[in-house]
Image: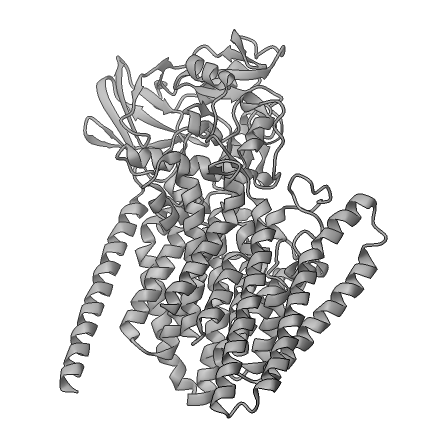
Amino acid sequence: MPDVVGLVYVVVAGVVLVVPALVHGTHLGPFDLLAQDGLLQQPGVVPHNTWTGDQVASMMPWTTLAWTQVHHGQLPLWNSYSGLGMPLAFNWQTAPFGLPALVGYLVPVQYAPTVGIVVTVIVAGTGAYFFGRLLHLGVVGCAMAATGFELSGPFVGWLGWPHASVFSWAGWMFAAALLIVRGQTRVRAVAFFALVVALALYAGQPEVFSVLAFALVVFVAALLVHTAVRSGAGAMLRPAGDLVVGAIAGGALAAPLALPGLQVFSGSLHSKTAGVVALPVENLLHVVFQGYDGLPIVGSARFDADGYFYLPAYVGVIAVVVAVVAVVMRRRRPEVVALTAVALVTGGVVFIPFLISIMDALPFFGSVGWTRSLLPMAFALAMLAGVGVDALVRSGRTRVWQWTGAGFAAAGVGLVVLYLATVPGLSAVDRRIRSHSFVWPAIEVGVGLVVAFGSVLAYRRAGRPDDGTARRFRLRAGMVAGLALLLCQTAFLVVAGAPLFSSSATFFATTPPVSELQQEVGSSLVGWGPNPGYFCVGLGIHPDVNSVFSVHQLALYDPMVPRSYFSAFESLAHRPAGDPAANDYCPALTTVSQARQYGVAYILESAGVAGPAGTTLVGRVGNEDLYHVPGAYPATLTPLPADGSLPADGADGTPVAVTHHDPANWKLVTRSATPQVLRLRLTDFPGWHASIDGKPLTLESYAGVMLQARIPAGRHLVELHYWPTTFSVGIILCVLAVAGLATALVLDGVRRQRRAAQR
């Protein structure tokens, strides 16, 4: 029953975090950002949070598209609306097989993203609580660790992205690894570890999984070193081997996503992205402050950083002080040493440029943004805080509370010095913002001092700790004091995180211009003229959001966009197609031949700007002019020259009708008197297979980014489907892993029953 109460507290705290935002609208998400540009523009809408655009521009549209395909009985493999088509399940960001998405499929689509966020918070909190129980913490200590992690700045700052979904499994993964190292229930621990590894991989975002794996390696290495010192180097071999087996089994369980996902990643822009530079050391202040340098929300005018989700590190004064108490009082415990190592190493990777340069130089890790190591740093601090509070509650020793009081006193002095050194010289607006950030740290220090010194006085009045009555009194007093610290920390973290969320009463509201565009273009592909604006948000519908409204647009905003997209367009038009560093593909079409080559049937221009020569003005859509491109089709037949060579990329062709029974399938019927080449405005991704009259058809690259195939004369049925071979291999590996783990568990159960019978 105490654990039930503790878990209820953790879950309620996570839900309370989002309640203030839901008061203003039942749909979590920065939908107000969409009202700033293009055909979704709505005058008078003020964005609440300017740094959460990716949630509503990419994550939520992909979640919506996956939900729609699943509810149509389709596997969410292909996104036909962005660019010339992009993988949906295998772009890592969508995570359609992750737990938040799976739960989201059970509710109406407009609530799926909100439910996914709540599920992510609950997974994080319950995992940290379970890990705390394995550390032999009491209920209050477990609740302190769980709420400290699930409500921490690094975690809350990434809620709505797959980053938080991946790292929500940290508590479960560390717990499974600890079970393996301890060597108890060996087979079940390995199976448990494999399952958690797979769930974390299915959550998306391989970068954050790399960060999580790195932190876990530090934790396990510290434990194994302790094992070697205590029992000899040979004692390390079994747990190290079991961890490797569990990791391999987990990778096999996640192979249906991981193998094709890595295939997509290898040719993408993101595979060449450099890691984020180290944060300035002064940002360590953010561990105890929220909003010290302002917030990206309405009413906070001082914020000039590169992105808020890289900066929030707050866990609070209480967590830091009691974490130090844990290190001092429980330093002999190997788990405490290991968690301390995780906090120090991951913190060093965030703030020390030399360390982050070393990490960037490692094979396979050069594209990881190591500032995301704030996540494991906050996790380690939260778990240490749980250990510290457990020591305060259960030790019954005056010395523990003396250390705690000294820690809060030092924190109070530090706050006063920092305030006097940084606040008076600021402008009036900046002074107000920074002064406000000191309120909660001051409250935490005050509560900590009152609780610490009150507990010391109560302990002294209770008498000697070896007296039974006195000890029971001390434990009750420690419980009350621990609960006071827990409640104060939870209040701070909820108040700190709640303003970051945006919400809306509507879910991707359609505007009249969007409805007009839908009616005019149907299933045709839409492109932009020469002035689309940054991230293509000046015209049309924000890239990727167009999928929600079933409008096909050539532009896209996706870290998995192939590098060939940019090189192919630059070869054709002799100018960039957007900003590769920002994952922004936004080609400006200035001629009819360019539009035809990509199958763009309509072009949007700013009001009053003429379209390319040869196009026809269809009419005005909102504040934009829509032009029709004659001769632009998704599939065309072009005669093959007599020598059998392929015709020029820009050669004209006759249209071929295309039918789809789902986004990952194309069906065409060709008729010609001579051999032709069938050109498809479809991205050349590994995984597309073709057949002609039921026989395999070889696909070739067209214009560096699309597909084409040689078609003999006559009438032929051509079918294409997207199903990567690596996906099939991944399914086989997953089935084998499930069978192997199930067999091992059954045999282990039989052995246990025999041993029990013998005893």
Residue depicted at 63% across the width and 31% down the height: 46
* Residue 192 occupies quadrant: bottom left
Residue depicted at 31% across the width and 62% down the height: 249
Residue depicted at 33% across the width and 32% down the height: 699
Residue most toward the right? 425
- Residue 40 is situated, as x and y percent measured from the top left of the image, at 54, 23
- Residue 152 is situated, as x and y percent measured from the top left of the image, at 55, 57
Up the image or down, 500 lies above or below 134; here it is above
State the residue in front, 154 or 110. Answer: 110
- Residue 321 is situated, as x and y percent measured from the top left of the image, at 63, 71
The answer to whether residue 373 shows anywhere in this view is: no
Image position of 715 (left or right of 448): left
Up the image or down, 469 lies above or below 476; here it is below
Image position of 8 (left or right of 665): right
Task: Locate the N terminus and report the quarter of the image it occupies.
Answer: bottom left
* Residue 405 occupies quadrant: bottom right
